[in-house]
């Protein structure tokens, strides 16, 4: 049996990166079910939960870093923020950057952020595509 998992994809509409189009795409995955039904496989559920947790962590990290920056205190490293985003927390990072207006004008950070998003989506897509080919 096959089913689709919706994924969020973001396309930049203008060169400044200030406007975005949010669309959904889907991955075709195989699901073996003894009843013949189609449902979300355990691996897809684990991925969704991990992505949600990392997104919450990323969102909180951007908020904390903005708070620390205002008080001129010890900050969260850019490397750590990018790592969380790369591991799957990029939706929370994207929302956090926009909500807290943090790390939005530093060009080098923005470029690396979007590279982590693209790389994450490519890796996850390749993994699930390869998995669906095996089933």
Image (spheres, rainbow, N blue to C red):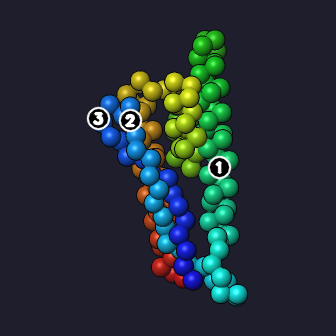
- Disc 3 crowd rating (10 Å Cα; few below 14, some 14-19, many 20+) is few
Q: Position of residue 106 (x, y in %)?
A: 41, 24
- Disc 1 crowd rating (10 Å Cα; few below 14, some 14-19, many 20+) is some
Are dots 3 and 1 in contact, CB under 8 Å? no
Query: In which quadrant is the N terminus drawn?
Result: bottom right
Write the residue at 63% across / 11% down: 71
Q: Which mark is residue 52?
A: 1
Are dots 3 and 2 in contact, CB under 8 Å? no
Q: Secondary structure at mark 3?
A: loop
The residues tagged by marks 1 and 2 sit, at their Cα atoms, a distance apart of: 24 Å
- Disc 2 crowd rating (10 Å Cα; few below 14, some 14-19, many 20+) is few
Q: Position of residue 116 (x, y in %)?
A: 46, 45
Q: Nearer the viewer, mark 3 or mark 2?
A: 2
Q: Which mark is residue 41?
A: none
Label 3, on which residue?
A: 15
The residues tagged by marks 3 and 1 sit, at their Cα atoms, a distance apart of: 29 Å
Label 1 vs 2, first from the N-terminus: 2
Quarter assignment of residue 48: bottom right
Label 2, on which residue?
A: 19
Q: Secondary structure at mark 2?
A: loop
Q: Is residue 108 above or below residue 90?
A: above
């Amino acid at each position: 049996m096959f089913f689709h998992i919706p994924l969020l994809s973001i396309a930049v509409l203008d060169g400044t990166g200030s406007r975005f189009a949010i669309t959904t795409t889907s991955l075709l995955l195989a699901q073996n079910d003894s009843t013949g039904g189609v449902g979300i496989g355990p691996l897809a559920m684990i991925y969704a939960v991990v992505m949600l947790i990392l997104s919450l962590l990323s969102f909180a990290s951007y908020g904390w870093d903005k708070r620390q920056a205002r008080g001129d205190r010890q900050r969260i490293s850019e490397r750590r923020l990018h790592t969380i985003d790369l591991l799957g927390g990029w939706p929370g990072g994207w929302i956090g950057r926009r909500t807290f207006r943090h790390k939005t004008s530093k060009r080098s950070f923005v470029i690396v952020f979007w590279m982590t998003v693209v790389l994450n989506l490519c890796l996850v897509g390749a993994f699930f595509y390869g998995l669906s080919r095996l089933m």
